[in-house]
Every structure is written in C-alpha cells, then in structure tokens.
Amino acid sequence: MTQPSYDVVEVVAMQLIGSDASVIPVSSEFSFRTTDPYTVRAVFTGPHTMSTWLLGRELLSLGMHAGSDAPAGTGDVQVWRDEDPDYTLISLSGVEGSALLAAPTEPIARFLAATEALVPLGTESARMETEITALIAALLTA
C-alpha cells in the first residue's frame, strides 16, 4: 500500500546537545499530512544514526510559547523556547536514552503556520470524521 505524499515538509538544521555540553549537528525533517492532522513526523539524522518520532502537532505548537520552567508535554517529548527566543528546544526520552535538541525557531514556526493554513488547530476531528467512519465500517465487515 502506497503512503500519500506529505502536504507540508520542512527541513531544519538542529543541534544535539550532549550531557557534556558538546554539540553535534543534526538534520531534521518535519512532515505533516492533512489525512493525519494530529501528528507531525520528525526524522532526525545525525552523523551515525537516524531516528523517527511522531510528535503531537498541538504539543509542538504549545511548545513554541512555553518556557523552560513549564515546557509543553509531560511524557517522552517536551518542547519549549530557549532563553534566546530565536531557539526552540525539544527533549526526547525513549528506551535507548534521552536527547536534547536545539532548533532555530523560525523554520518550526513556518512549518506550523503552513500546517495550520491547511488544518487549523481545533478542527482536526472534523477532518478525521470520514476516515474514522471508514475504519469502523471496515472493522465491522472484516
């Protein structure tokens, strides 16, 4: 089955900040589909590894207005603005460890604005109604 292409894609040059304050360049690709409006797919590619995460679009948006004292997110993903408002920080925690990524705010804000132009925040469920109905019908006839 072929996956539809993404409606919005933004490549962001980020920095992985090590526990020893070392910095490693990381390329990230944020992708959004209107058929899955709650989710942002983020692929992080470093010199020796690649990791894919599914982030809540609302979480990412809330993080653009959050500070380090109250980041958006309470689980494996947290997002907040750095003391320097030109940077946004993303903390990822998983089975294999944790990562702190610093990204320029402008491309993430641009990405979110493009997604919201297609599906405004708060209107996702209306967009999903047809897909959910089809899924329920398929499950009942299987």
Image: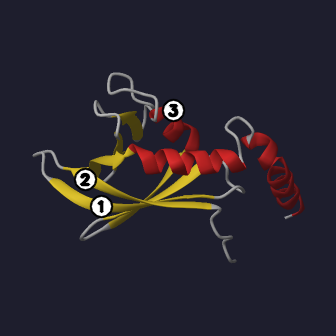
- As helix, strand or loop, the secondary structure at mark 3 comes to helix
Local packing at callout 3 (Cα closer than 10 Å; few below 14, some 14-19, many 20+) is some
* 6 horizontally vs 98: left or right: right
Residue that carries the numbered disc 3 in the rendered image: 62
Q: Which of marks 3 and 2 is nearer the N terminus?
A: 2
Indicate the position of residue 45 as horizontal and vertical percent values.
Answer: 34, 66
Estimate the x, y position of residue 21 in percent, counting from the top left: 12, 45
Residue position for label 2: 16
- Label located before the other in sequence (2 or 1): 2
Which residue is at the front of the view, 103 or 100? Answer: 103
The kind of residue on which mark 3 rests is: Leu
Residue at x-position 12% and y-position 51%: 22
- Using a 10 Å C-alpha cutoff, classify the residue at mark 1 as few (fewer than 14 neighbours), some (14 to 19) or many (20 or more): many
What is the C-alpha distance between the residues marked 3 and 2? 21 Å
In the picture of the structure, the residue carrying the numbered disc 1 is 26
- The three-letter amino acid code for the residue at tag 2 is Leu
- The local secondary structure at tag 1 comes to strand
In the foreground, 71 or 105: 105
| Residue in the image at 70% along x and 41% along y | 120
